[in-house]
Amino acid sequence: AHALRGYVLLELSQTQRALHELRLARNTGRVQTPALLCNIAYAYAVLGSPVKAVKTARQALAVSPGNSLVLRYLTGYLLAIGRFTEAVSTLLSSAGPREELSADLATALASALHHAGDPKAAIQVLRHTAERLRFKNSDALERAELEANATVLEFHLRRISRSQRLDAI
């Protein structure tokens, strides 16, 4: 009951009350679910405690290793506090082989790589994932988003001109 109340309060932007309910659920429940822990982490982040958000998201990842939603949250929290290299290493060690990354995790990895100072590697991840997904006949929208993100990074690196960027998109 506490977990559900906490989730509803999060949806209503009553974050402090939500956190109270979610912590009650964590403290009284027998099972620590990734969803519960992610909601607690999100509440901490909204309330301005990103270090607590990272710690709680790491607990969620321990409960559900490789969970893409947990990895995306954790990456975002790490990036928010400037721990770019840690975001990259967490994704690389927890998400599985680069060759098998989903579009959302590839985007998260590219963001982390870019923030860590390696935009060329970020572009490579985005392009490789888009190409791999093309051969799997997967969602065209996902592929287009990956390609567009790579094109924007290339433009920022001055590898392509404005007109080339528009043609690529």
Image (tube, rainbow, N blue to C red):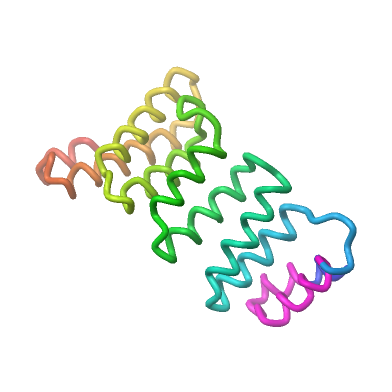
Comparing 126 with 11, the one in front is: 126
Residue at the spot x=57%, y=62% of the render?
54
Q: Residue 156 magenta-drawn?
A: no
Total count of labels? 0
Residue 45 placement, left or right of 167 = right
Image quarter of residue 32: bottom right
Residue 58 in the image, given as x and y percentages of width and height? 62, 55
Q: 53 above or below 17?
A: above
Residue occupying image coordinates x 67% and y 72%: 10
Q: Report which quarter residue 42 is drawn in.
A: bottom right
Q: Main secondary structure of the magenta part?
A: helix
- Location of residue 61 with respect to 122 vertically, above or below: below
Residue 113 image point, x, y percent: 35, 45
Can you say whether 45 is above or below 121 in the image?
A: below
Q: Residue 96, located in which quarter of the rendered image?
A: top right
- Asked whether 7 falls inside the magenta stretch, the response is yes
Using residue 46 as the reference point, say whether residue 156 is left or right of it: left
Residue 145 position within the rendered picture, expressed as x and y whole percent measured from the top left: 38, 41
Q: Is residue 104 left or right of residue 65?
A: left
* Quarter of the figure with the N terminus: bottom right
Q: At x 46% / y 25%, what residue is drawn?
A: 99
**At which x and y percent is residue 144?**
37, 36
Image quadrant containing the C terminus: top left
Figure check: 6 above or below 30: below
Over which residues does the magenta segment extend? 6-26
Q: Name the residue nearer the viewer: 23 or 142.
A: 23
Q: Residue at x 27, y 44 (%)?
A: 118
55 or 159, nearer to the observer = 55
Which residue appears farthest toward the top when viewing the image? 135
